[in-house]
Amino acid sequence: MEQNLHNYFKRFVCGDELHAYTFLGCHAQVRQDAEGFVFRVWAPNAQAVSVVGDWNFWNCEDLPMCRVEYGIWEAFSPYAKEGDAYKFFVRRADGSTVFKTDPYAFRTTSLPDTSGRICTLDGYEWKDAAYRRAQGKKKLLDSPMNIYEMHLGSWKRKTDGSVYSYDELADELVPYLKDMGYTHIELMPVAEHPFDPSWGYQVTGYYAPTARYGEPKQFMKFVDKCHQAGIGVLLDWVPAHFPKDEYGLYEFDGTCCYELADPMMNEHPDWTTRIFDFGRGEVQSFLISNAVYWMEMYHVDGIRVDAVAAMLYLDYGRSEYRPNKYGGKENLEAITFLRKLNRAVFSVRRNAITCAEESTAFPMVTKPDYDGGLGFLFKWNMGWMNDTLRYMALDPLWRKGSHNCLTFTMSYAYSENFILPLSHDEVVHGKASLINKMPGDYGMKFNNLRAYYGFMMAHPGKKLSFMGNEFGQFIEWKYDQGLDWMLLEYESHRKLQDFVRDLNHFYLDNSSFWNNDSDWNGFQWISADDCDNSVIAFRRIDRRGREIIAVCNFCPVARTGYRLGLPRNGVYAPILNSDDSKYGGSGMELPAVTAQKIPMHGLEYSGEFTLAPMSATFYKRKITQRKVK
């Protein structure tokens, strides 16, 4: 065996290989002047393995594999060809046999067939070089990030109910994202999965874009078109667990290869899925190489790591658990793995985006590993989401008793680099859509939601909202049908979409909302304690001192002569108001505010504001030119 391959295998078993997909799985190769494909699979405890496929009529005896080293098996076929379906036929340690899909297959067949397909990924001509150069120069923490989370199969459907292909989605989706002012999309898992209702969160083909919407190079083209339009692409990525489908990773060679062997700890009780063995080198190499694979082969900008809390805690969802070596409930192997993952990702892509969906108070998720952190770039702010949605769901009459739901988030807003998520998880399973969470009659629901969106956009943190939120989808999200786009025929939904579009572009155009997102110098309360009137006001300030004043009135009562502190002398003009009649609001006229030398709220000046009912309003200080004598 050549020395390089031996070294690759050795790094693989040690958990240090970042590109395991380049030598495991199926790859074109020339041997003794014969062109064909080499197959390699890790199955350390198998008695025997063979490759079966279209070219050998699925004959289990035709292409036996040889055990090479470190539990890796290999075979070469000059007859296999691009596009052929194939599997591994594994004789397990107990003598039983099973057909397994290649864990490193780049392409899969359409369900219900679960085979891999021989697929070479080279040859696609990328056109996103300018985008990638520009991204490489960005300071992501100081840049705008407004993410549109979506499920590819249910954004839109054709009239016959069939799904759009990757190509068709790109043609319709990219112009929509640009028009609406989003900077990124986050795709619910696109890796191959067997069960539609899992939404992609139970993966069987980690290296294969799902065949539901097309072929791998079509997905490359999808990402490419997004990049050419300046839209970043993030993938939901699922390293916490995998399903127990027999053809998948589950007990791959008859023993627990990819999952923990301990029967007390190797399954999630709530999900009945297997938990990866994060302490095993081969599993580390498999998962870390997978994250690198999506970034290098498909040019995706980053990953959102699903269910991080389930990885971090041994007692997650359990009444009984086996403590770590110190007697604690922290999963030390998973913590080490996550640090290693982030180091690896940033070593191959300096400007990569890694986000943790972490719902607990685990410390330093977005701090560097050398400071004791996990090394993620961002963390979803689940606390902000839960508190503010709880507040907005209250009748305005009772909001004053829960005013801290609006203000408490600022006590920890700069403890991590946060993304504010209004995700798919908040509009399913009886939780109601965002518009239906809002109290009041039909019109008041829209007023509440616009005010809430305005507050979200002004609050520190990057933004994420699930598809359909932007036009007020009334029913909960359903994975097996398209969004209710016909709602845009109704004025209230159309005007809500107009507001979100203008709000998104306002966010992009005003660096005060994003240039200082991770620094207390970017935020200052003006009024945080007026619970009786359900009013808050604060300043957002960029690194050059430019600022916007946000005033939110979460009561359906207009107020005049409402005095707020102001930082400087001058005139402050309203520049965006969620209550504007063009967005479906009352259209109450809001005059500019002249600062007076009356100290208030710890500021040197103050002014009398008119507060529109149930509104979020942004003010800027007018720049007046000096008169030339």
Image (cartoon, rainbow, N blue to C red):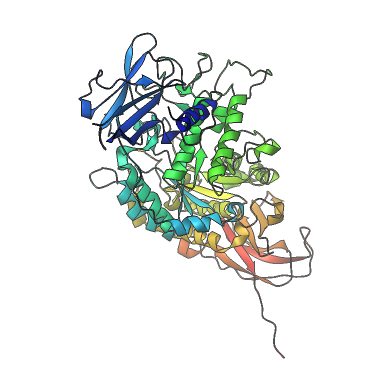
Q: Nearer the viewer, residue 533 or 575?
A: 575
Q: Is residue 394 visible?
A: no
* Up-down relation of residue 564 to residue 381 (above or below): below
Which residue of the protein is positioned furthest toward the top in this rendering?
Answer: 94
**Percent from the top left, x then y, of residue 110?**
27, 34
Q: Is residue 43 visible?
A: yes
Q: Residue at x 25, y 33 (%)?
A: 84
Q: Residue at x 24, y 47 (%)?
A: 159
**Percent from the top left, x then y, of residue 121?**
35, 42
Quadrant containing the N terminus in the rendered view:
top left
Which residue of the protein is positioned furthest toward the front in this rendering?
Answer: 32
Q: Place residue 347 in its image quadrant.
A: top right
In this rendering, would 56 be left or right of 137? left
**How many circles with numbers are drawn on the protein?**
0
In this rendering, would 610 be left or right of 92? right
Quadrant containing the C terminus in the rendered view:
bottom right
Q: Nearer the viewer, residue 621 or 91?
A: 91
* Up-down relation of residue 248 to residue 597 (above or below): above
Which residue of the protein is positioned furthest toward the left in this rendering?
Answer: 57
Q: Place residue 49 in its image quadrant.
A: top left
Q: Nearer the viewer, residue 126 or 7?
A: 7
